Amino acid sequence: MSWTAYNQALLHASECAFHPWSFNVSPLHAARTPKPYVTLSQLIIFTLFALFSAVFVLWRRARKVIAVAALALFWLLSAGWLTAPVLALVQHDASHYPPPTFGPRTIIVVLGAGTEYDRHGALVPKSDALSRLATTASLYAQCKQGNRHCEIIISGGNPQRHPATEAQTYAPYLTEAHVARDDLVLEKASLTTYENAEFVARILHSERYDSLMLVTSAYHMPRALLDFHRFGLTPEPVASSGKIVRCGLLPRLPNLIAANVALHELIGMAQFYVYRALGWF
């Protein structure tokens, strides 16, 4: 996929679409895509539903208005008409990222996106993580073509308390994609995006590099860049994939999942600015 086609795909990913967005970067992603799921900490739509229910019970005089408002909101989100513009707020900029530039010493940082068990009970990267790994492997191959020094930092600890960290689980996928094990650095302590940036900054403190790239999902990139800039790092953003919204009359679960993701990112960015205003970092 050319960078023009890639940017066009990202541009339309969060718009109302009636066909799935195909992002083809590597067989690594296509062959091992597990079923996605939303963690409890990201069930923002469920929380909204619970709040509407509580208000409905407590405020008897306005029950009809509350019921209509709740139904309208959840229909707009699940049918995609409200989810699309909300999602565009967090991933639209990804369509304007320039092609990455490779220096003599290039470092590629890929952020974790969780792990889960497949139907055989094996611990595997989540779907979004596989997209990030495929994009990282593609960047590494391009980097090596110029006989450059190329290093990959996999940043991801174990927030889900699985038997292995994200970095440990992801590493074999990159070595299978012809990434040299000596070119991999595993950052296994971070539990949040903020810690991704903090601990990668510590690693890079003693590193010499000419080009620094950050690989994560399109919807996650704005918040990730805020955190990396906080620690004095200005990586080139490379978005691996984006969420899809399909608009129509009938509600769709993937649209609610996309809304959860978008709201999670917006809340995270708001939290960043609040913490900075309070002088907490």
Image (cartoon, grey):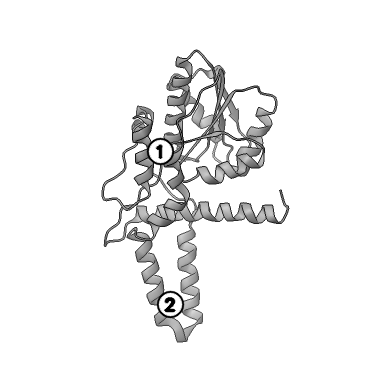
C-alpha gap between disc 1 and disc 2: 41 Å
The spot of residue 278 in percent (x, y) is: 71, 56
Q: Nearer the viewer, residue 236 or 37?
A: 236
Percent from the top left, x then y, of residue 12? Answer: 34, 46
- The residue pinned by badge 2 equals 66
Q: From the image, which quarter does the N terminus lie in?
A: top left
| One can see residue 123 in this view | no
Q: Residues within 10 Å of mark 2 (few under 14, many from 20)?
A: some
Question: Along the horizontal axis of the image, is 89 left or right of 23?
Answer: right
In this orientation, which residue lies closer to the viewer: 178 or 88?
A: 88
Q: Earlier in the sequence, mark 1 or mark 2?
A: 2
Q: How many marks?
A: 2
- Residue drawn at point x = 36 percent, y = 34 percent: 4
Is 161 left or right of 14, judged from the image as shown?
Answer: right
Image: 109 above or below 45: above
Residue placed under numbered mark 1 in the picture: 118
| Circle 1 Cα neighbour tier, 10 Å, few/some/many (<14 / 14–19 / ≥20) | some
Say whether residue 209 is left or right of residue 120.
right
- Decide which of 251, 53 is in the foreground and name it: 251
For label 1, the SS is: loop
Q: Can you give x and y, in whole percent of width and height, for residue 39 in the image?
A: 49, 50
Q: Is residue 64 visible?
A: yes
Q: Give the quarter of the image for residue 32.
A: top left
Amino acid type, residue under disc 1 in the picture:
Asp
